[in-house]
């Protein structure tokens, strides 16, 4: 288990950082404005930092490793990055295919896209299934919601700071479903509530998985 945790921790940190580096356009000698307005890149960044600390902590041990391997923390961070894959694959990909057509195929197959939306989330989920303490407290199913709610607060505050006419190359809202200008208050509220319900259900799904592991 520990060997698998170390291997996956190193791979996850490396993949997350490389994926973000490429998503930001730094491998092409430029920086894409608004890179860190996206949940995808922020969740990969936090996953990369956590996995790097976990990798180091697995050798150091002690209080650092105990804190990093806490059941509630690992459960919450696994949900944080798993959401990246689920929202992208089942919600955003169909929309991109409809709007971009054939041009989206090459974009979808790019190394950085597959890394941040598929490889990192699914490998993190596998690591949790194999290595994590499954004694997840029930309160964690509510506490983990602080992550998407914090992101929502950040996105709306950023939109307010940018104002109605942000500078060229910068999107005021990172995702159309939370675009208050486009959706209007009614649709915006409906979209946010639907997302919140989805996050609650997903939290209980992973909690149920942890309960099954404990039972057997």
Image: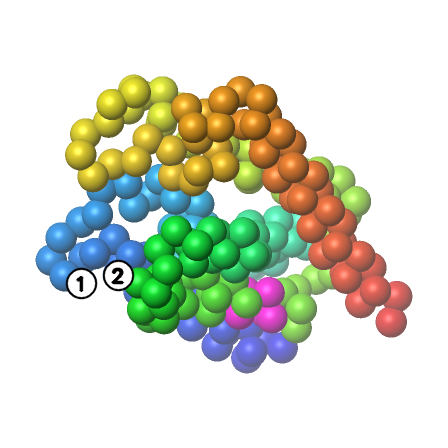
Residue 111 in the image, given as x and y percentages of width and height: 33, 70
**Farthest residue toward the right?**
215
Say whether residue 186 is left or right of residue 52: right
Say whether residue 194 is left or right of residue 19: right
Q: Main secondary structure of the magenta part?
A: helix
Residues packed near mark 2 inside 10 Å, few (<14), some (14 to 19) or many (20 plus) = some
Say whether residue 118 is left or right of residue 211: left
Q: Secondary structure at mark 1?
A: helix
Which span is picked out in magenta? 123-127
Q: Residue at x 62, y 77 (%)?
A: 1
Q: Residue at x 80, y 67 (%)?
A: 213
Residue 103: quadrant of the picture: bottom left
Say whether residue 34 is left or right of residue 145: left
In this rendering, the count of numbered labels is: 2
Pick the front one: 130 or 54: 130
Q: Residue at x 33, y 43 (%)?
A: 36
Quadrant position of the C terminus in the picture: bottom right
Pick the front one: 10 or 123: 123
**Farthest residue toward the left?**
29
Pick the front one: 125 or 193: 193
As drawn, 114 above or below 195: below
As drawn, 45 above or below 140: below
Say whether disc 2 or disc 1 marks the residue closer to the N-terminus: 2
Q: Which mark is residue 198?
A: none
Residue 177 in the image, given as x and y percentages of width and height: 49, 37
Residue highlighted by disc 2: 22
Residue 91 visible within the image: yes
Task: Tell me whether circle 2 and circle 1 mark residues in contact (CB < 8 Å).
Answer: yes
Residue highlighted by disc 1: 27
Residue 46 visible within the image: no
């Amino acid at each position: 288990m520990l060997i698998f945790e170390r291997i996956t921790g190193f791979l996850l940190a490396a993949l997350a950082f490389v994926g973000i580096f490429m998503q930001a356009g730094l491998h092409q000698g430029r920086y894409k404005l608004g890179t860190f307005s996206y949940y995808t890149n922020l969740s990969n960044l936090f996953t990369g930092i956590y996995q790097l600390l976990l990798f180091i902590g697995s050798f150091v041990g002690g209080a650092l490793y105990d804190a990093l391997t806490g059941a509630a923390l690992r459960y919450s961070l696994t949900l944080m990055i798993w959401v990246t894959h689920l929202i992208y694959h089942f919600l955003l990909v169909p929309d991109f295919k409809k709007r971009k057509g054939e041009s989206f195929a090459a974009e979808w197959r790019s190394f950085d896209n597959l890394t941040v939306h598929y490889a990192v989330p699914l490998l993190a989920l596998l690591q949790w299934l194999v290595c994590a303490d499954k004694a997840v407290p029930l309160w964690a199913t509510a506490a983990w919601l602080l992550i998407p709610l914090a992101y929502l607060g950040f996105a709306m505050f950023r939109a307010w700071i940018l104002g109605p006419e942000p500078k060229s190359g910068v999107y005021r809202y990172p995702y159309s479903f939370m675009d208050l200008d486009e959706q209007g208050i009614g649709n915006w509220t409906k979209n946010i509530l639907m997302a919140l319900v989805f996050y609650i259900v997903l939290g209980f799904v992973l909690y149920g998985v942890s309960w099954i592991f404990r039972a057997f």
